[in-house]
Image (cartoon, grey):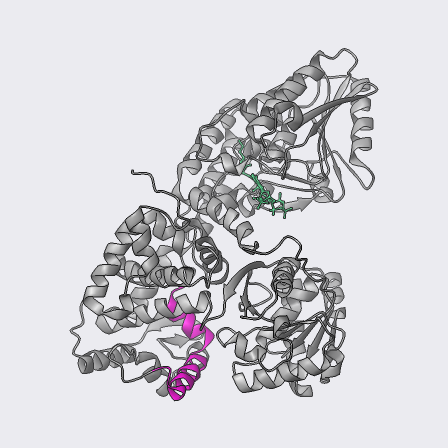
Amino acid sequence: MSITAEDAVRYDVRDDVAILTIDFPPVNALGAPMREGMVQRLRQAEADAAVRAIVVIGANDRFVAGADIREFGKAKKGPELVEIQTMMEESRKPVVCAIDGHALGGGLELALAAPFRVAASRAKIGLPEVNLGLLPGGGGSQRLTRIVGPEVALDLILEGKHISAAKGKELGLIDEVTDGPVIDTAIAFARAKAQHGGPFPKTIERTDKVAGTDPSIFKTTREANAKKWQGMVAPFKIVDCIEAACTLAPREGLAFEKEAFQVCLQAPSRAAQVHLFFAERQAAKIEGLSASVEPKPIRKVGIIGAGTMGGGIAMSCVNAGLPVVLLEAAPDALDAGMAKVKSNYEISVKRGSRSQAQVDKALGLITTTLDYTDLADCDLVIEAVFENMAIKKEIFAKLDEVCKPGAILATNTSALDIDEIASATKRPEDVIGTHFFSPANVMKLLENVRGTKSSPETIATVMAFGKQVGKVPVLAGNCEGFIGNRMLRAYGTEAEHLLEEGATPSSIDKALKDFGFPMGIFLMRDMSGLDVGYRMRQGRIEAGTLDPNAPDYTPLADRIVEAGRLGQKSGAGYYKYEGRDATPDPEVESMLKTIAKKKGITRREIGEEEIVNRILGAMVNEGAKILDERVAQRASDIDVTYAFGYGFPKYRGGPMFWAQQKGLDKLLEIIRANHARYGDRWKPAKLIEERVASRTDWNGATIEAA
Ligand code: 3H9
């Protein structure tokens, strides 16, 4: 149902104050009806002889969440934001924005153009456009900089920070903060301003915080971040705009920002980041789930295993205020685990990311135990011991005995069969995978893995739990490696073949880094340690699911570990190390030559383009198979998995989005050529063939001819 301008902004008068209430669900974004409504209502208030002051407020405890992201890339209808801002700035009656919830992006820009702002203490404000590949394009880079100065503006806008109302007041962005109803404070404030009379302040004309700015801060910022921002457009343009706020006259600065905003809007990185914004929200939704299924409340979490993963998961829970019972098999393991948790917290206090009081509160929520019966009243228990099916089954059998009926029993396995683990209990409907990523207290992804018998309620609960602890939950099906690690294997295998054919660990890592990954695959493997993967391969060989004599088997990883090279921790792996500094190692090169010779491969020079196309092509081909098998609910879930769990550059939108931008037809050509050349590991996924034949995208929508 479309919303009219009159409904999007309501008009009431309380004595002599007009109240403009923005009511444009879901988040009061600056969509066309809302902009039109604001223009109409401001005119009405201006013309209303009974009105001496104007208050703008958002309905449903929200102010305005910014531009309507759904409008990007479409023809613009209705008035521009700037028209509303000019009306508020030029009004003869004082305009007060009453910020009750979020004032973000264009929402804060709207408020900054009003002469006054009051906020509820729970309100959050910020200019997070950078996360969408954009910059504040409604005057935010100019007005905010003029209020807080360039140093603070660089920090707030480049990081896309949401700050509290109290912090906003400290910085001069908010005039008054209240714990009571913000509408009452705003009305009283507006009345006092009307009483006092104009002219009212215009933020855009302030110069006190920008005069005499040292221009070197902009150069230093660009240089310091050049690597981090590689491939992105918005952060560089943000620095330019903040500099413009310090050097140009108000209207010129606004014009400069408008032009820079257009550049960002057209950049492919904007489309990619907006795709991820919606993909992240979509990922939380479970297809086919009846609306009557409610997640169970999670008030206490049990964690089994105080190793790196268990400790990190415990930190995620207590950081969100959830009490944790941390269980280990032996006292020394428990002590070592808690020592690691404490040292992680000490580092965060030293860095200033947490206060000592916050850390004390978090640590106070952890109870340690060696006794399974202490898990009896937990709503959710997460097992995070090492990857051994027999041990996991033993643990789940014990949980079945001690946990209360209806408790969710979850495993943090990264690859093992959830159904087999569930079979150790008499309640497989309560069993599910909750796969965290290391370091679990930092990484955003939570890959929840549904077993064949996991109940809808169990699935809904772990998805809601993910949000509760600040993660980005994605739902995967039960297969070896689920979504993330199954694709990682395809990608790793291709990288290993490239090595045998003539690439080097450093040439592959460089190509991946240039593509935008924070680090290449071989450096990453060296960092995590090579022995775990080796043991897992040996297990698969013993179980008969992996054949080391198959022609496609790539033995370098085994040879490296067998030579005592376990990665960074042993001083050598795919690279050799001086501390943390990696350098290419001729010994690995000679291992590769031996392997290639044995396989009859003539090694050759391999360029970056081929490396990227082969690695990403293999990854997407596997992704399409995952999608076809319904292991992932939708292509965008795979993008979310990779962007939040595997370092896939967000400005490229994820592997499936990348493939679609490149053209599924072009990708299929590459896959077919590789299939002809390398055989079955490149067998094209049926889904890609179908999509190309029907000229549709991953979602089945028709692709318009270019
Ligand atoms: C900008 O402002 C550019 C300007 O500088 C230029 C001006 C000229 N538009 O997150 P939720 C939808 S760029 C359209 O689950 P929460 C969202 O997709 C913008 N839709 O809720 C979801 O839909 P669905 C700068 C939007 O309570 C529903 O609302 N602003 C928008 O957890 C609920 O969202 C931002 O970057 C939007 N702007 O969190 C803020 N925002 O139900 C982006 C949300 O169909 N928004 N939706 O899945 C947010 O950060 C969060 O949504 C917010 C609420 C914190 C507001």
Task: Depth check: give the residue in front, 548 or 405.
Answer: 405
Instruction: Give how far across and how far down residue 88 sits, in percent.
Output: 65, 21
Task: Depth check: give the residue in front, 613 or 211.
Answer: 613
Q: Is residue 134 magenta?
A: no
Q: Residue at x 58, y 83 (%)?
A: 393
Q: Residue at x 43, y 38 (%)?
A: 264
Could you say which quadrant of the image residue 498 lies in?
bottom left
Instruction: Give how far across and how far down residue 110 sits, in percent.
Output: 62, 30
Magenta-highlighted stretch: main secondary structure? helix
Which quadrant does ligand 1 occupy?
top right
Depicted 585 relative to depicted 619: above or below: below
- Residue 521 in sight in this render: yes
Depicted 483 relative to depicted 33: above or below: below
Classify the position of the C terminus by image quarter.
top left
Q: Which residues are magenta?
A: 519-546
Q: Is residue 544 magenta?
A: yes
- Residue 92 in sight in this render: no
Instruction: Give how far across and how far down residue 305 sits, in percent.
Output: 62, 79
Classify the position of the N terminus by image quarter.
top right
Q: Residue at x 73, y 21 (%)?
A: 94
Relative to 421, is 184 on the left or the right?
Answer: right
Task: Depth check: give the residue in front, 192 or 216.
Answer: 192
Q: How many marks?
A: 0
Instruction: Give how far across and how far down residue 74 sits, in percent.
Output: 44, 32
Q: Residue at x 67, y 80 (%)?
A: 399
Could you say which quadrant of the image residue 412 lies in?
bottom right
Task: Depth check: give the residue in front, 310 or 631.
Answer: 631
Could you say which quadrant of the image residue 566 lies in?
bottom left
Relative to 529, is 21 on the left or the right?
Answer: right
Depicted 398 relative to depicted 239: above or below: below
Relative to 644, is 561 on the left or the right?
Answer: left
